[in-house]
Image (cartoon, rainbow, N blue to C red):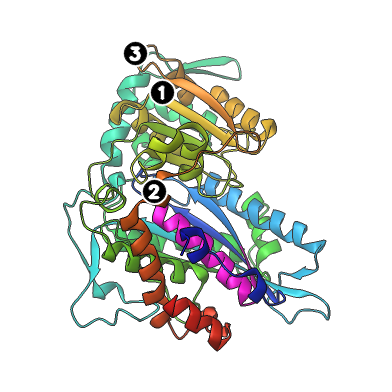
Amino acid sequence: MDLDEAMEGSKDNRKKIEEVQTIFEYRCADSRDRGWVERKVANGMVDWYSEAGINIIRKSIVGAGVFATADVVDGLMRGIHRKIILGMDKKWWPFRDAAWKGWLPMKFAVQVNTHADARLKKGADPDAVVHRASDVVFEKHSSINCGMGHASDVYNDLMEFVKGRLEIKAGDRLIVVHDEDSMREFLKAVHAFEGEDPRSFIKPIVDHVEHVKRQAGKIEAALSGPVPGEASQSVNVLAGFQLRDVNWVVNQGITNYRTGEVIRIDANAEVYTVMDDIARMNATILAMLPNVHPEKARRVEKQAPVALLLCSPNVPHPRNTLLELVGGEAASMATPGSVFALSGYDITSPTYPFGPYRVLSIFYAVKHLGIKDIYLLGEGNGEINAMELKMMRDPIVRLIVEDKEFGVEVHRVDAKKSERHTSLTSVDPLARDALIEGRRAFFRKLHPKSQLNKLPPERLKQLRTE
């Protein structure tokens, strides 16, 4: 059986679309996140859901540490608004109450995933949709834990880099950063920072469970808007007022790069999305690959990416897409591990500077990971121009990009116009066999809450055996 045929849906079996689900995935910038296997799984899953009458729309938000800073949350909210407006033309109903006659229900899910060397305690039910935090066990000093646990150290290096070089006009004054006090003035003028200690502008991850819960909670609070009786005219609160009746949910989890498993730790046990199915199939397939296979081995090696990617959220599978566009066949085999990535609606908004963890990520990628090539990947010149303007108008990022010692080169890539290269992984017999057998095993043990149970019995049998 041809691999593409094995991992794609059947056009002949597709039902009439009865529901629309839009997924916003917020995942880490770490170059080991995702891979070719997950891409094949995700594409197949979208097709199979379509066969079940569900139209899946996926958008990627990528950032180091998955911090829910104002820039990221604002971009997410604008992304939801855009999808709602686009859905009006097709009569997609985004609200929690029953859809009007002739309209299709439209649901939104935000999936926030940090990553760590985590597993379930012995005795915990691996088939449970969500788990208690107390059921999760961590390897504290593992190399696959999120590097943002060392964010304070990176900030200190950034501070040394900008001293005497970073300056900004604030009214009639010229602020030149040379110590913590002048850095506080700079952050207040450029980033609306209101704290006393500029080091609190960046906070490291201490506890992965508490961290992802806190970030998901911030997103949930923003989407909910203020409690009745509270008065505020802030942009995010007003946007929250507009979204509070929209049918959305925020799920949270911890991804283990070693196994591909995602442990959800939210309170939404009744909510099972396409992301749960993708995670389960991805883990099933990775378990069938030998540990030395690049798709598996590169997930646990120390990351050594060759590129930093700034990407529009409208480009699917940002890392794989970049490598197909610019790297050819050899680079396509290098995922995961080749591309440190940042993506989101804020990335393509040139009217305000990068948020704190975006800035820190760019510095970390160039200074600590030694990356020399930055790629701006968008759909058309408009998005690419926006990213380039944002990068060069941000005072700190401009310093990084223009520093001669770093020797960074910026490349523009149009996803609409560039020729794509075929991945050699598609003819890798080990990957091919693992994908096909993993798909069969997944459907043999299909989770009872999966919406793929809506597929006709004969189609399910086919997916379990062929």
Q: Give the foreground label among 1 and 3.
A: 3
Residue 459: image location, x then y, percent: 55, 81
Rate crowding at label 2 as few (under 14), some (14 to 19) or many (20 or more) other CA atoms within 10 Å.
many
Residue 409 belongs to the span the image colors magenta: no
Q: Amino acid at mark 1?
A: Ser
126 on left or right of 143: right
Where residue 32 appears, as percent x and y from the top left, is 33, 47
Kind of residue at badge 3? Glu
All told, the count of numbered labels is 3
- Residue annotated with mark 2: 425
Q: Amino acid at mark 2?
A: Thr
Please say whether residue 42 is one of the residues in the magenta stretch: yes
Q: Position of residue 385 (x, y in %)?
A: 64, 28
Instruction: Name the residue tied to disc 1.
Output: 182
Mark 3: secondary structure: loop
Mark closer to the chain start, 2 or 3: 3
For marks 1 and 3 on the same chain, the one whose residue lies earlier in the sequence: 1
Image x and y of residue 243, in percent: 67, 64
- Distance from Cα at disc 1 to Cα at disc 3: 25 Å
Name the magenta segment's main secondary structure: helix
Residue 31 in view:
yes
- At horizontal 60% and vertical 48% (from top left) the residue drawn is 75
* Residue 346 sits above or below residue 403 on the image: below
The C terminus lies in quadrant? bottom left
Secondary structure of the residue carrying tag 2 is: helix
Residue range highlighted in magenta = 34-56
Number of the front mark, 2 or 3? 2
Q: Which mark is residue 223?
A: none
For the point 61% across and 26% down, which residue is it? 389
Name the residue that disc number 3 marks: 405
